[in-house]
Amino acid sequence: MKKKELKPEYQPGGAQRQYIIDKAVKYLKEFPGLQSDKQSFLMEQIGLSDTEYLEALNRASGGELVKTALGD
C-alpha cells in the first residue's frame, strides 16, 4: 500500500499545519487504543514532529503533561 502524502499546505510550515495538530488532539482524546499506537500513527503516518506530537499530547491532556514534567 502506497503511503499518501499530505498536501503542501498541511505539511510542516504550511498554512494549514495547525489544522493537522488540532485533529491530532481530537484523535488522542477521543479514540480508544494504546498511546504508543497513536504516537506511532501520528508521527510515522501523519508526519508530526516530536514537538508537534508533544504539543498535541499536552493539549489533549489538558496541560497535565507539562505540569507533570515540571513537578507542579
Image (cartoon, grey):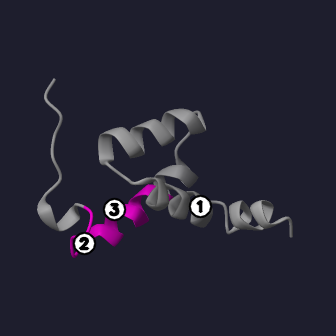
Point out residue 19 in the picture as x, y percentages from the top left corner: 33, 68
Q: Amino acid at mark 1?
A: Ala
Quadrant position of residue 52:
bottom left
Task: Name the foreground residue: 7 vs 51.
Answer: 51
* Cα gap from disc 3 to disc 2, whole angstroms: 7 Å
Q: Amino acid at mark 2?
A: Gln
- The answer to whether residue 7 is magenta is no
Total marks placed: 3
Residue at (40, 60) in percent of width and height: 23
The residue carrying mark 3 is: 20
Q: Is residue 46 left or right of residue 71?
A: left
Circle 3: element type = helix
The residue carrying mark 2 is: 16
Residue at (85, 64) in percent of width and height: 71
What secondary structure do most residues of the magenta stretch adopt? helix
- Give yes or no for contact between labels 3 and 2 (Cβ–Cβ under 8 Å): yes
- The quarter of the image holding the N terminus is top left
Point out residue 10 in the picture as x, y percentages from the top left corner: 22, 63
Looking at this rendering, what residue extends furthest in the bottom direction?
A: 15
Residue at (66, 60) in percent of width and height: 61
Circle 2: element type = loop
Q: Is residue 19 left or right of residue 8?
A: right
Q: Amino acid at mark 3?
A: Ile
* Residue 42 drawn above or below residue 72: above
- The answer to whether residue 14 is magenta is yes
Q: Is residue 67 left or right of residue 15?
A: right
Q: Is the residue marked by circle 1 packed among few (<14), some (14-19), or many (20+) residues within 10 Å?
A: some
Residue at (54, 58) in percent of width and height: 54
Query: Which portion, as a residue range, is magenta?
Result: 12-25
The residue carrying mark 1 is: 60
Point out residue 41 in the picture as x, y percentages from the top left corner: 40, 38
Q: Which mark is residue 29?
A: none
